[in-house]
């Protein structure tokens, strides 16, 4: 049996430290600190056995702190990724690795040294390395692309994703890799139109590119060759446009929606209502685009927009379009009027599978409407919401709707909906355990994201029970959760041992790292050694990051 407090006080400091050491706990502090640490350890682990020495190697504090893979230096070993700001020495080492055909699928060559160090010899080595290496899949480069480097890129057979800026292009020669699938091009104000014309011609001749991202960085795109290229292209299926000012010619909108594109993503800084409304109107009767994703970069002022017209347009788009499967309207700061239009459209829609409404200005009654709609929707499989508990639309706000009503509505949806496989409710403030009680018996949901939410100890208890009893969930994220005491967090971690189906669990920053290291890690180690863990793969993952 674990010793009582009075019994611990009889031990010498040396004996107490040995007990702590045997159980992988810190041994620093005075006698009262050591006694308290042992008492807390056995309180949290609920141990009824005699303290026995474990054989697991002690995890050092240094090992615990490392939560991300370090940059792997150039060696003769296989690595998966190199991405860092490089000195000329490191830059040359990478070139050497390329010429040795080392395995570097993800390579970001961001050079930070003096320009005069990039000599002809360095460029020639890079060109040869790019031409000869058969392992690179994703590549980006910060230095200028001249004839030498263009030759190396154009002769590469492995690069699928290329990320460049138009102002880097200093050659009229073709630099597009032979089997490129995904091109991300930043068009900036330093772009030379001659090179843009040449680039457009190279793109027209390329039949392999399927995914094309164009970032307009303070660039006047009103008479851009890229538009002309997209007008005629019949190969691109995924188009991602990023604008400073979201203004598109009407003719271009019509052509782009009548092209081969099936995934259209638009991100903007300043929204032009006419362009947005025109895009939605044309998209309503489109029969080939399956993904529509539009989002803003910065907070917008909702008073500048005619929300009633937008509401009607979104309702018509969602209810009449039978091709859309993925609809993402993140960070648009739409207000309640638009929210009601989206809900009305979804009640009639049977094609949309994924709905992402992250960070809009909806208030509680809109989320109740969404939950009620989910209860009876037969097509939605993925729903992502971000609750803006500080920023809300007050224009149509019903003060009678409270957060606990929102929770009860989603709990009811989780009970009745038999199609939902993923639910994100970020920034939630959970005042009742209703959702977690419903999840104990839910048998369809596989992924649950409740990150950055306020749980509280009364709800944390039900999170533990939900993890123990649910048999469909595979991935759970409650990272950056607040208002949970350390003992409740340990109970949540302990509950994982009863659920063999969970393969991914994120509780990062829901408690201080020192606590998780000091108490949770020894608990997981002890239980694994005593073979009380049925979820060994996940426990190993947790131990590797704690």
Image: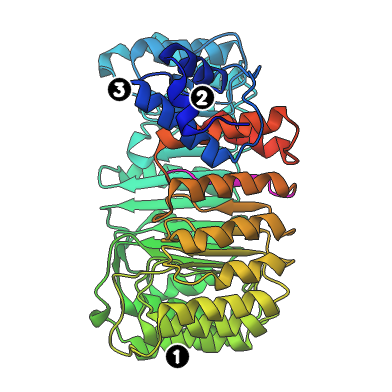
Relative image position of residue 413 (x, y in whole percent) = 62, 78
User: Residue sitting at 55 percent across and 86 percent down?
Assistant: 345
Q: Is residue 132 visible?
A: yes
Q: Is residue 67 visible?
A: no
* Above or below: residue 367 compared with residue 267: below
Q: Main secondary structure of the magenta part?
A: loop
User: Residue sitting at 46 percent across and 39 percent down?
Assistant: 163
Q: Quick one: label 3, few (<14), some, or many (20+) residues within 10 Å?
A: some
- Tell me where the magenta segment starts and ends, as one range: 501-509
3 or 2: tag closer to the N-terminus:
3
* Above or below: residue 278 compared with residue 529: below
Relative image position of residue 524 (x, y in whole percent) = 61, 34
- Label 1, label 2: how many angstroms apart (C-alpha)? 52 Å
Residue picked out by circle 2: 151
Residue picked out by circle 3: 112
Q: Please state, as top left, top right, bottom left or bottom right, where the N terminus lies in the image.
A: top right
Relative image position of residue 250 (x, y in whole percent) = 40, 76
């Amino acid at each position: 049996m674990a010793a009582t407090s009075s019994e611990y006080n009889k031990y010498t400091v040396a004996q107490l430290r040995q007990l702590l050491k045997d159980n992988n706990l810190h041994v620093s502090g005075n006698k009262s600190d050591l006694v308290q640490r042992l008492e807390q350890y056995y309180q949290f682990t609920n141990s009824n056995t005699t303290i026995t020495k474990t054989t697991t190697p002690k995890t050092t504090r240094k090992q615990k702190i490392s939560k991300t893979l370090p940059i792997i230096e150039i060696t003769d070993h296989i690595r998966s990724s190199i991405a860092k700001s490089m000195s000329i020495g490191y830059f040359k080492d990478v070139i050497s690795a390329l010429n040795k055909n080392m395995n570097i699928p993800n390579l970001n060559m961001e050079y930070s040294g003096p320009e005069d160090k990039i000599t002809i010899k360095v460029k020639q080595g890079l060109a040869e390395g790019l031409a000869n290496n058969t392992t690179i899949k994703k590549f980006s480069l910060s230095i200028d692309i001249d004839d030498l480097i263009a030759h190396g890129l154009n002769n590469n057979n492995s690069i699928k994703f290329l990320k460049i800026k138009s102002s880097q292009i200093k050659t009229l020669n073709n630099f597009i890799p032979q089997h490129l699938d995904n091109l991300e091009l930043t068009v900036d104000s330093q772009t030379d139109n001659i090179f843009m014309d040449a680039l457009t011609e190279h793109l027209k001749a390329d039949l392999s590119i399927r995914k094309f991202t164009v970032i307009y960085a303070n660039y006047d795109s009103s008479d851009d060759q890229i538009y002309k290229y997209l007008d005629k292209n019949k190969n691109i299926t995924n188009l991602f446009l990023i604008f400073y000012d979201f203004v598109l010619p009407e003719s271009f909108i019509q052509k782009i929606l009548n092209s081969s594109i099936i995934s259209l993503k638009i991100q903007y800084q300043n929204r032009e209502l006419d362009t947005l409304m025109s895009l939605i109107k044309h998209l309503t009767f489109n029969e080939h685009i399956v993904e529509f994703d539009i989002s803003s970069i910065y907070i917008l002022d909702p008073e500048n927009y005619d929300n009633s017209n937008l509401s009607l347009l979104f309702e018509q788009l969602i209810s009449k379009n039978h091709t859309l499967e993925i609809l993402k309207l993140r960070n648009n700061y739409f207000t309640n009027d638009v929210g009601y239009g989206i809900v009305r459209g979804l009640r009639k829609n049977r094609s949309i599978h994924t709905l992402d409404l992250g960070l809009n200005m909806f208030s509680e009654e809109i989320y109740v409407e969404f939950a009620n709609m989910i209860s009876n929707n037969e097509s939605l499989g993925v729903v992502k919401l971000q609750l803006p508990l500080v920023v809300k639309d007050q224009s149509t706000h019903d003060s009678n709707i409270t957060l606990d009503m929102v929770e009860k509505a989603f709990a009811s949806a989780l009970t009745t909906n038999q199609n939902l496989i993923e639910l994100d409710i970020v920034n939630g403030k959970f005042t009742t355990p209703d959702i977690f009680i419903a999840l104990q018996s839910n048998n369809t949901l596989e992924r649950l994201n409740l990150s950055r939410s306020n749980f509280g100890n009364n709800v944390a208890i039900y999170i533990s029970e939900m993890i123990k009893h649910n048999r469909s969930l595979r991935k759970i994220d409650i990272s950056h959760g607040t208002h949970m005491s350390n003992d409740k967090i340990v109970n949540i971690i302990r509950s994982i041992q009863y659920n063999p189906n969970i393969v991914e669990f994120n509780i990062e920053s829901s408690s201080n790292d020192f606590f998780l290291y000091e108490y949770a890690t020894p608990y997981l180690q002890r239980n694994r050694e005593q073979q009380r863990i049925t979820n060994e793969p996940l426990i190993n993952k947790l131990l590797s990051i704690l």
